[in-house]
Amino acid sequence: MNKIRLGQHGSLLVAFTSAQGLLATYAYAAPDSEIINSAVSTGREIYSDFNTLTITPQGSLTGTGYAALNISGGYLASLQNAGAISANNGYAVYSSGTLGSLDNSGTIANNSATGALYLDYGSQTESITNSGLIGDTNSNNYGYAIYNYGYINSLKNKENGSIIGAIALYNNGYINQLENAGLIANNNNGYSSDGAIFNDGTIDTLVNTGTINSSYTSGIVGGSVALRNYGTIGTLINSGTISSNYFAILSDSPSWDAIGTIINSGLIKGPQAIYFYSQNGNNDSLDINNSGTIAGNIYNYSVSPTVIAGGKDKQGVLTGYKDTSGYIFTNGGSVTFSSGSLLLNDHLYTAGGNVINDAAQIQVNNPLIINGNYHQNAAAALISGVSDAATATGDVRTDAGYGRLTVNGAATIDEGSRISLARTGNTYAFAPGQRYVVINANSADTHYNADKLVYSAAGFNGAVKGAEYDDGTRNALVLSLVEAPVAVEPTPAPEPVPEPTPAPEPAPAPQPAPEPAPAPATEPQTPERVTPAPKEATPVIVEPAVPAPVETVATPPVATAPAVAVAPLPVAAQPAPAQPVAAQPPVRALATQPDASAALGGLANYSGISPQLLELYNASLAIDGKAEANRVGERLSASQNINAATASTQAVTQAMSVVSNHINTARNPQTAGMSGVSTGDAYDSWSVWGQPFGGFARQDSSEEVSGYKAKFGGLLLGADRALGDNWRAGAALNYSNTSVRGQDNLSGNRSTANNYGVIGYASYTGNPWYMNLSAGLNRQNYTSTREAEFTGFSGKAHGKFNGQSVTLQSEFGYPFTLPADVVLTPMATFTYGYQHVDSYKESGGNGMALNVGSSHAQSVTSDIGVRLEKTVATRLGNVTPFAQVSWIHQYDDRQMSSTAVYGADTVGETQFVTKGAAPVKDMAGIALGTTLFNNQDLSLDARYDLQAGERYQAHTFSLRLRKTF
């Protein structure tokens, strides 16, 4: 091989190519760097310290021997390839030394037998970043893309990067961090079944946001492996795709700690999605945190337990490879569903172990089999998904279309655990009389605690009852839907029933009446039969007139009538049922605050199948009492975010007030309103000023909405100049931050608004009156956190949204100079404001997140008052204290409102409207301050403002520095 050797003391400029004596030139090499921008076919060797080797997009490096680039023991600080590196019979890049960084945006290609990048034993590599191609997409190429027998601190395959080979990455050394955002795949040559990634060493952390894929169908086992682990992987985090037509993840490592934790929020797909086999009988558990989808079987052939957690804000899915049910198999340990939300579509087989639902919400939409025992703890939930084609008669032989667990072992459900029904379609409706077999287990050792479980059926207004049906062999837990109990109003008729005892006492009185009657000898028998009937019937039929029926006792109609009436009356007097209230009470009726009632009312309309929203829905049914309903309902509404939008206007208002105050103080108070050229301001003189301001506001709670506390602070930077004798104009940039914390029912909720704006202003000075005009355009960026926690539910929703506002303001004043140079200025300010808040979608929340529509509000206010000021000369300059009082009136007192639906509601049935606090109609305004003039071109002033009205206060402090140029 003809190779140029690069050392730190120089570089070879030319090389001989053949015995013919032809002279060829190569890229210029500086003592510690080389740039290749053309085709070079002689290769390079780094044998001592070297700084940078750069190959441009026009350049290429090709070797005909061992390697195109050989780092044979030296140190290469940086290899930057935007061109092509390849070798005819060897490796494109070989290293047994130290490589600082390798940045590839071009191609590092392997040939049919060797690798593109070979990092040998003892090699040290700090970072590899690939946004090009390492390897070869040719299916006839049997070479590996990357071999690593050394140490790699960081290997990153970026979004547009590809690592492709018979094995894309073979690791027999140590990789600290492997991150893939692009494609790592085999090239479908059928040569090896060892995987797109074959780890035979150690990978501390593997993070995949891209695709790891292997899909060839020939070869030794007739299938492929996307990720094979024969060593140790500390943590595997997947939010992308790991897929194969055979094994997506295969771990058959002899290591005791083969894979620490698999965290999946993406897709893991293959006939065998996860295949875990420990050759040494590893006792560590196979831990899977799944908020994404695992489509394929999960096998754990070790004796270790399998622990699976679902998503917190998203339902994880466990299902089969091609839209069928899959399998979860353990060889000796148990399967534990530890927490979170899961849609389970896998049968479970445990060889001597148990299936435990510790604290998870498991939804089952199809009949599934558990070979082993099933135990559901009190904190767990089982949701049976019911399809539109469901048949629900309670007969396990004929029922279909809904989720059910068939347990070939014993089933135990702890007291307080939840069993619920949820629709998975759009047309199916729950109705009284339906019965669902949700669990069917062996009779022996099965304990359902059916009378101590919590049952529900989403969207059903009746009652759900659970019962055991044991035939001696199988024991089923059956849920029945029944009519809601109806309250029976007591009627006046039963009222006499409690007093039948005193009535029989007058009964002997009629006995003498028949004696004088000249009756035949047989007549006495008639009163003997008739008389007992009136004794019982008389007090019931006619209580106040007992003797009346006795006088006509011998008449047959009288005798039969009371006999008919007596029997039903005691039945009618039965007390009303002990539980006359419906099984699902309208909780919104308990709430008295409008926003709370609206939010709970919207939630009550939900009939979908989102587990998180159903959890919230079910928990809301247990709310007890008006205070709790108001607290929970308002926290579920958008009140906090409306309060944030309302509070942010205070900072905007104060910024406009600061600008107005600047315009007024720009007039020298000693001239009582006269300014301009006559007072020393030239036409071209500029005044540059800055003013920080800050304060706090408080909106007290009312019967309609909870209040808030807000803190705000901001900065104004402005410049203006005189335009003739009477006009002055300028502009200011405005930034402010407002922090809002909810009070009372909203305690713990918080929001932030960042405001960016520009304010243009102008002032006209008459003689002696003046007029100020200003207009502000602002943008608000909001972030918010809403929290709700009550019995059976806990959630935290996050919002991020924007808004815009426009403010127009005009001020008129007429200064009067009083004795002792005191200036009195009556003034009137009129302000119009318009605020718009964009629509947004919250995240998280465990079901309470909202999709909120856009909203807007406007205000029209007047501020009429008087200002009193006096300038006093001191050694430090002219000090001008002032005091101002005013009456602030709001003409538009409409409440800001927004329309929202719960995020998991896809049809809009949970829509409700939230309204904020009504603007304060009348407020008092007080301003105090002082102006310090050091000289003609520098001034300093401080100011305090107070606005106070019914249930509202705002305090603002500001300090201004002004410099005239």
Image (tube, helix red, strand yellow):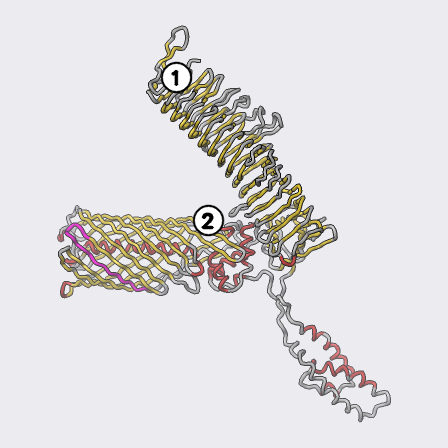
Residue at screen point 65% across, 45% down: 368
Q: Is residue 928 magenta?
A: yes
For label 1, the residue is 5
Q: Main secondary structure of the magenta part?
A: strand
Q: Quadrant of residue 674?
A: bottom left
Q: Position of residue 825 (x, y in %)?
A: 21, 62
Q: On the picture, is 532 further left or further right than 911?
A: right
Residue type at mark 1 is Arg
- Of all residues shown, which one is farthest toward the bottom? 516
Residue type at mark 2 is Lys
Q: On the picture, is 292 further left or further right than 348?
A: left
For label 2, the residue is 841
Q: Position of residue 17 (x, y in %)?
A: 40, 10
Q: Quadrant of residue 669?
A: bottom left
Residue at screen point 57% across, 34% down: 251
The answer to whether 894 is drawn above or below residue 217 in the figure is: below
Q: Which residues are magenta?
A: 923-939
- Quick check: can you spot residue 329? no
- Of all residues shown, which one is farthest toward the top? 20
Q: Comparing marks 1 and 2, which lies closer to the viewer? A: 1
| Secondary element at tag 2 | strand
Q: Is residue 817 magenta?
A: no
Q: Nearer the viewer, residue 741 or 730?
A: 741
Mark 2 or mark 1, which is nearer the start of the sequence?
1
Badge 2 local density, few (<14 within 10 Å), some, or many (20+)?
some
- Quick check: can you spot residue 238? yes
- Give the spatial CA distance, label 1 vs label 2: 61 Å
Q: Position of residue 803 (x, y in %)?
A: 38, 50
Q: Nearer the viewer, residue 414 or 956?
A: 414
| Secondary element at tag 1 | strand
Q: Nearer the viewer, residue 334 or 368?
A: 334
- Point out which mark residue 945 bears: none
